[in-house]
Structure formats: structure tokens, C-alpha cells
Image: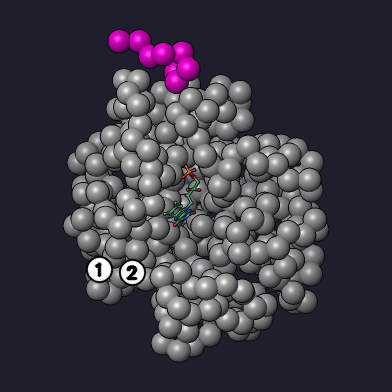
């Protein structure tokens, strides 16, 4: 049966890396579900949840913390203990048995945490800039984090590398570095949250250094072709906008362009949202203009708008988030032209 023209671009295979061909261009976006078990170990229910979505061209897991002080939400899985690696191995096996491919998203929340998750310690961040607001699912308010000492930074970078080694041991097809959405790496990349005046702050080269060190540590463990990164050039979550940030991303993307990574993934909730200080308008257009490699777009896509974005050359892959929660069989529904079930927040209460 031939596909309707409107969705054909979604079903063109893509060679992502040596030995890794995606059968379609639909990526399941990373989505935190807060359903890990004791010790932040992935569960059988998580294995079944991801396996049900195995027809995606690529699944990116929920954010997975690289060390204990990277946690900012309840029951988010980790990738730093043996039990966590064993739990993820079961998830990977289930997805592979279902014919799927799985990248693990490596995450440290930085200042978006609270002492309640950290045995009473303060969250770590590039600088001691307070975060306003309420901690989700609690009555607590966010706090002022502690600035990382220069001597501590190599340990944090190394934790990402170790997590990538663990991801490889668990059988993942690759990893995505979570450099977006206002979390630790993104905090180094924006002036609002990075006030350092040492080798990690003050200039675009210095502000991009932490991110590039993480990329190099992870790529050394996983292979560059099996390493993607999610970035938010537009500060839209947990931080304030500053037009000077563009120069940081210009530098970062030029550096990433020489590293032969799997992809850069737009961390934005609206693919079509525009920003005055991005000359190209949208985040995807800005990334396309400054990064020569593969681009994953995301944010508010329907199957048709995702296919249109690919057809227009705005990106190489389209990530879909909430509709994948509502429709485990999303790929089959799209292929067969069936209507999608509408997403509702209450669906987050159960892992189905
Ligand atoms: C419940 C939920 C959890 C999310 N967790 C993550 C996450 O762990 N990592 C991440 O990079 N983005 C996360 N996101 C953002 C999504 O990856 C995606 O960018 C966003 O939902 C917009 O895409 P959509 O309109 O297709 O849902 C989350 C979104 C939702 C709704």
C-alpha cells in the first residue's frame, strides 16, 4: 500500500551511523516519567513501555541522571550503579526484541534541584544564581545553588563519560547528551546562569568549554557517531533570555560541526516559535544555519507538520513527544492514516 504524500517524508530510512539505520524519521522525544524503582533502577514496566513504541525510527529515553546530585525530580532513573545498568539492559533487550533502537538521554539537572533530593546538600551550578518557583510535586520552593569549584568540574565531566560507558555496557545503540532546557550544561551556556570569570565563563569559548568537554568524554566512550546532543539556543525554560548567548552557541555549534556526531536535537517546545535575537527566527532554522550535521526538530508536531518540516529541509528527523505517550502505536497509526488519540496530562499517572 502506498503512503499518502503528506506523510511520505517520515518514512524515508536514514543511516545514522555505521551499522545503525533508522527505518523511519520519527523519533520518540525524551520524556521524564518519574517511574523508576528503588535505587533509581529502571523497571519491567519501563521495559514494556519503551518496547511498545519500538516501531519509532529511534527512541530517546527519559532523562537519566549521571550521578546522584544530578537528580531534580522523584524516581528518575540513573546510570551510575550496577543495578541501574542491569535494569537498563532489560529495557534495551525488550526494545531490541520489538525491533527498535534506543538512545539513553544523559542528564544532570544542576540548579534545578532541591536539598530534599540531595541528602540536604545544595544543588550544584556554574554560579550561585537563585532559581524561583515551586519544586514540582512538592510544597518546596527552589533555592540558591552552590557554584562548582574549578577543581570539581573534571569530576562532573567524568561522570558523563562513565555514564556513557555504562550505556554501552547496557547495550544502548547510543546516547543523547541533555544539553537543553535549563539544566546543568545549558546553565553553563547562558549568561543568566553563568557568571563565572574563570576558564568556564565570561567569553563564548569559556562558556562552551564545559559542554564540549562533556561531548568529548561521552564520544570517547560511545563513539561520536553514536552520540547526539540536545541544545536550547533560545533560553525558554528555567532561565532568562540574554542576546549575548547567541555568540556562545555560534562558537559551540562551529566546534560541534567538526566532531561528526550523530545529530543535534532542538530543545524547544514549539518548532515554529520565533525569537528576535535569533537572526534566522526559529531555533531549528538557527541550528540549521550554524550546524552542518543532522538535525532533529521537535515541538508541537502533528504527523503532517513533522513531515512538512522534513520535506522543507528544516530538519532530518522529527521528534514527537506527548502524542507518543497517548499513542504507543503512533507509527502504525500514522502509516495507516488513522487518527491519533489526544494527549492528556492524566496519562502521565500511568506507564502504558
Ligand atoms: C512529561 C514530559 C517529560 C519530558 N521530559 C523530558 C526529558 O526528560 N528530557 C528532555 O530533553 N525533554 C523532556 N521533555 C520535552 C519533550 O522531549 C519535548 O521536547 C516536548 O514535549 C515538546 O514536544 P511535543 O510537543 O511533541 O510533546 C518532556 C516533556 C514532557 C511532556
Alpha carbon distance from label 1 to label 2 = 7 Å
Quarter where residue 291 is shown: top right
Vertical placement of residue 273 versus 150, above or below: above
Q: Quadrant of the N terminus?
A: top left
Where does residue 178 sit, x and y in percent of width and height?
51, 57
Whether 124 is among the magenta residues is no
Residue with the mark numbered 2 = 75
How did the renderer colour the structure? one colour
Q: For this rendering, which residue is in front, 32 or 101?
A: 32
Q: For this rendering, which residue is in front, 50 or 270?
A: 270
Give the residue at x 24% y 49%: 352
Dot 1, crowdedness within 10 Å: few (<14), some or many (≥20)?
Answer: some
Q: For this rendering, which residue is in front, 118 or 346?
A: 346
Along the horizontal axis of the image, is 238 left or right of 222? right
Give the residue at x 31% y 20%: 336
Give the residue at x 35% y 26%: 339
Chain part drawn in magenta: 1-8
The tag on residue 52 is none
Where does residue 127 sit, x and y in percent of width and height?
67, 78
Regarding residue 75, the answer to whether it shows in the image is yes
- Helix, strand or loop at label 2? It is loop
Give the residue at x 22% y 39%: 98
Q: Contact (CB < 8 A) between labels 1 and 2?
A: yes
Where does residue 157 sit, x and y in percent of width and height?
54, 69
Dot 1 beta carbon under 8 Å from ligand 1: no
Along the horizontal axis of the image, is 245 left or right of 299? right
Of mark 1 and mark 2, the one earlier in the sequence is 1
- Helix, strand or loop at label 1? It is loop
Along the horizontal axis of the image, is 192 left or right of 45? right
The tag on residue 37 is 1
Q: Residue furthest top?
A: 1
Quarter where residue 8 is shown: top left
Amino acid at each position: 500500500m502506498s503512503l499518502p504524500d503528506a506523510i511520505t517524508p517520515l518514512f524515508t530510512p536514514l543511516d545514522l551511523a555505521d551499522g545503525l539505520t533508522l527505518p523511519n524519521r520519527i523519533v520518540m522525544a525524551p520524556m521524564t516519567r518519574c517511574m523508576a524503582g528503588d535505587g533509581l533502577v529502571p523497571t519491567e514496566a519501563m521495559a514494556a513501555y519503551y518496547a511498545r513504541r519500538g516501531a519509532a525510527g529511534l527512541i530517546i529515553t527519559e532523562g537519566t541522571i549521571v550521578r546522584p546530585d544530578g537528580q531534580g525530580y522523584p524516581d528518575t532513573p540513573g546510570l551510575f550503579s550496577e543495578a541501574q545498568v542491569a535494569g537498563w539492559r532489560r529495557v534495551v533487550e525488550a526494545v531490541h526484541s520489538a525491533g527498535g533502537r534506543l538512545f539513553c538521554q544523559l542528564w544532570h539537572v544542576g540548579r534545578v534541584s532541591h536539598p530534599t533530593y540531595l541528602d540536604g546538600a545544595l544543588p550544584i551550578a556554574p554560579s550561585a544564581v537563585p532559581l524561583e518557583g515551586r519544586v514540582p510535586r512538592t510544597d518546596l520552593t527552589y533555592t540558591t545553588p552552590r557554584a562548582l569549584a574549578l577543581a570539581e568540574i573534571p569530576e562532573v565531566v567524568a561522570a558523563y563519560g562513565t555514564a556513557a560507558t555504562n550505556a554501552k555496557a547496557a547495550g544502548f545503540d547510543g546516547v543523547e547528551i541533555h544539553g537543553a532546557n535549563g539544566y546543568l550544561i545549558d546553565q553553563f551556556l547562558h549568561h543568566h546562569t553563568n557568571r563565572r570569570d574563570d576558564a568556564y565563563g565570561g567569553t563564548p569559548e569559556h562558556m562552551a568549554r564545559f559542554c564540549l568537554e562533556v561531548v568529548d568524554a561521552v564520544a570517547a566512550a560511545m563513539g561520536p557517531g553514536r552520540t547526539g546532543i540536545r541544545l536550547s539556543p533560545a533560553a525558554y525554560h528555567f532561565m532568562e533570555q540574554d542576546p549575548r548567548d547567541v555568540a556562545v552557541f555560534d562558537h559551540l555549534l562551529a566546534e560541534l560541526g567538526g566532531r561528526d556526531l550523530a545529530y543535534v536535537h532542538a530543545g524547544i517546545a514549539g518548532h515554529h516559535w520565533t525569537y528576535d535575537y535569533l537572526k534566522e527566527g526559529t531555533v531549528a532554522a538557527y541550528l540549521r544555519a550554524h550546524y552542518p550535521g543532522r538535525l532533529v526538530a521537535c515541538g508541537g508536531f502533528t504527523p503532517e507538520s513533522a513531515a512538512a518540516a522534513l520535506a522543507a529541509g528544516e530538519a532530518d528527523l522529527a521528534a514527537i513527544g506527548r502524542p507518543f505517550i497517548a499513542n504507543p502505536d503512533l507509527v502504525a497509526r500514522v502509516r495507516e492514516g488513522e487518527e491519533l488519540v489526544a494527549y492528556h496530562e492524566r496519562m502521565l499517572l500511568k506507564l502504558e
